[in-house]
Amino acid sequence: MIIVPEKEIAGLLTRADAFEAVEKVFASMSKGSAYNFPVIREAIGYEDALYGFKGGFDKAGMALGLKAGGYWPNNLEKHGEINHQSTVFLFDPDTGKVKAMVGGNLLTALRTAAASSVSIKHLARKDAKVMGMVGAGHQATFQLRAALEQRNFEKVIGWNYHPEMLPNIEKVASEAGVPFEAVPLEGLVEADVLISITSTFAPTIMADHIAPGTHIACMGTDTKGKQEVEASLLARATVFTDEVAQSISIGEAQHAIASGLIAQSDVHELGAVINGTHPGRTRADEITLFDGTGVGLQDLAVAASIVDLAVEKGVATIVDF
Amino acid sequence: MIIVPEKEIAGLLTRADAFEAVEKVFASMSKGSAYNFPVIREAIGYEDALYGFKGGFDKAGMALGLKAGGYWPNNLEKHGEINHQSTVFLFDPDTGKVKAMVGGNLLTALRTAAASSVSIKHLARKDAKVMGMVGAGHQATFQLRAALEQRNFEKVIGWNYHPEMLPNIEKVASEAGVPFEAVPLEGLVEADVLISITSTFAPTIMADHIAPGTHIACMGTDTKGKQEVEASLLARATVFTDEVAQSISIGEAQHAIASGLIAQSDVHELGAVINGTHPGRTRADEITLFDGTGVGLQDLAVAASIVDLAVEKGVATIVDF
């Protein structure tokens, strides 16, 4: 039994490794050689916490297990701990015995960033120059850092409900040597690639904020009722997702589906584009939209990718279990 | 983060402790201060394994987490490992951080035995003399050992589909100083208390095998389609269970419900009897039937009960996580 503590993750998982693990598992999901289990997500009636399990099995990568944890909104204030807490448990598919436990907090941030990044690689125009951000919180910095590696961006533009947080993402842009500009929502029309990473129950991004040819990755909607973009935008766009079942029930596509603007068959797996069974973007003026809902297999994939390395580097604890 | 390995469980968890933990959590479930999450149970399409998660939250006992694992039918033959493999993970309800990992194999055997034992304490006649067993596998020995502590039994009678396995339970009876007798199915009518612990998809125990006044604990049915006793017996009996939702869907009551012999309102929580909100047995000639389906909260309760003791005794590993 191998234990990789949270504090070691930063030294083990590079953005490139997370990207590769997520790209590979999206491909496996689309081939049917990896699948996610139903998600358990419970408001436990204590500390306003949401707690649950996202599990799955990737037969190709031989990763079996779950991420357990959730959202404790009072953590920071009461305990000086971050509000999102999670741990990944990997099991041996040959025996059912627990194999590894891996801190899941930074992993989650990196795999979520990797997902939008994989979507940019496969769906954005090659000549994309302007990177747009809606959202400027902690997770937004991860998304932007990963996104900037996918194209030769010349400018980052950003909008946030609390403009005083924009320096968070401005800092990431500067570190990557790209100028940053705060814009009003209407200014987003300049973006060639746009990531939205907010937690909201009413759409912020309207259809006319998006220019033809844009690739937009919606990364904030993972619950019934949440919504980042106007539903009619999904009807104008070619829609992709990590997992169709989640996209249409708890993802950004839930609203466009519910109002009949698109059908389930209009939502495509990003994995199919990676595998070459879906053409992806076919025109320069096409709007592509990636609905990133977050699946357990992403967590298992990135966790599995670092277990051996952690042992090699001597930063894992090995326990007789 | 506290780790209690499988091999230490035998030295930590007594039958009495398991009994107390299970009795308490059944009571909490019935009071509404503890609840189980939906169960995830997946045939993963590899090694014929069934894998899943049983989670829950006991606000009274402050136990939050899950048991993960399952059934790997080829383990013994291929790897010399037991076929049922599971691990319990406990989380801190105040912060969502993982708190303990506890080997779940022996725990599961002990908590399952404790459940029928709790049902005997609260539902069997005080003057019960003859203990009956249907099933003689590994788990049957745990059930019988625990049951014999609940009444002054003078005889154990047993039946098994493979009679050559009966010495397993005969040994337990002898160790407890109680004579054992193998009987045909019709001979079970002599039992005052009967435990069935088999894995079968057609009923073995018919209504006329059971005499008035008997308490029967059906412990083998935990899946759609499984069945140990004839459905009409449930109509003759007062039916109790650990969790009504499981009893009527994957437990012994599924068949009597499906065929309209009983209604959901005829299935009572054993916890209500423990709490005194249901009278339990009211007549000496009443047949009481406990449908033990197995809930995640049992696992959490017994696991939580030994974590501190394991630390005190110095058999836990404490890992910085």
Image: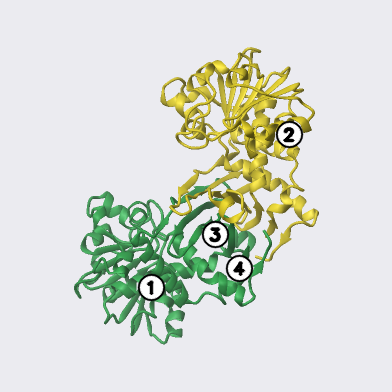
Chain colours: A yellow, B green
Mark 2 vs mark 4, CA separation in Å: 44 Å
Q: Are marks 2 and 3 in contact (CB under 8 Å)?
A: no
Residues at marks 4 and 3 on the same chain? yes
What residue is shown at x 31% (from left), y 56% (from top)? B253
Q: Amino acid at mark 2?
A: Lys
Residue B33: percent from left, percent from top = 39, 60
Mark 1 to mark 4 CA distance (whole Å): 25 Å
Q: How far apart are the two marked residues, 1 and 2, measured between alpha carbons?
A: 63 Å
> For the residue labelled by badge 1, is the local secondary structure a helix, a strand or a loop?
helix
Q: Which residue is mark 2?
A: A171
Q: Which residue is mark 3?
A: B92
The amino acid marked with disc number 3 is: Asp
Residue B4 numbered mark, or none: 4
- Under mark 4, the amino acid is Val
Seen from the viewer's position, the closer of residues B244 and A215 is A215
**Hey, which residue is sitting farthest front in the picture?**
A164
Same chain, marks 1 and 3?
A: yes
Same chain for the residues at labels 2 and 3, yes or no? Answer: no
Q: Chain of mark 3?
A: B
Subunit of mark 1?
A: B
Looking at the picture, how far across and down is residue B292, in whole percent? 37, 63
Q: Is residue A59 visible?
A: no
Tell me whether marks 1 and 2 sit on the same chain.
Answer: no
Q: Nearer the viewer, mark 4 or mark 3?
A: 3
Between the residue at mark 1 and the residue at mark 3, the CA separation in whole angstroms equals: 30 Å
Specify few, some or many for label 4: CA neighbours under 10 Å numbering under 14, 14-19, or 20 or more. Answer: many
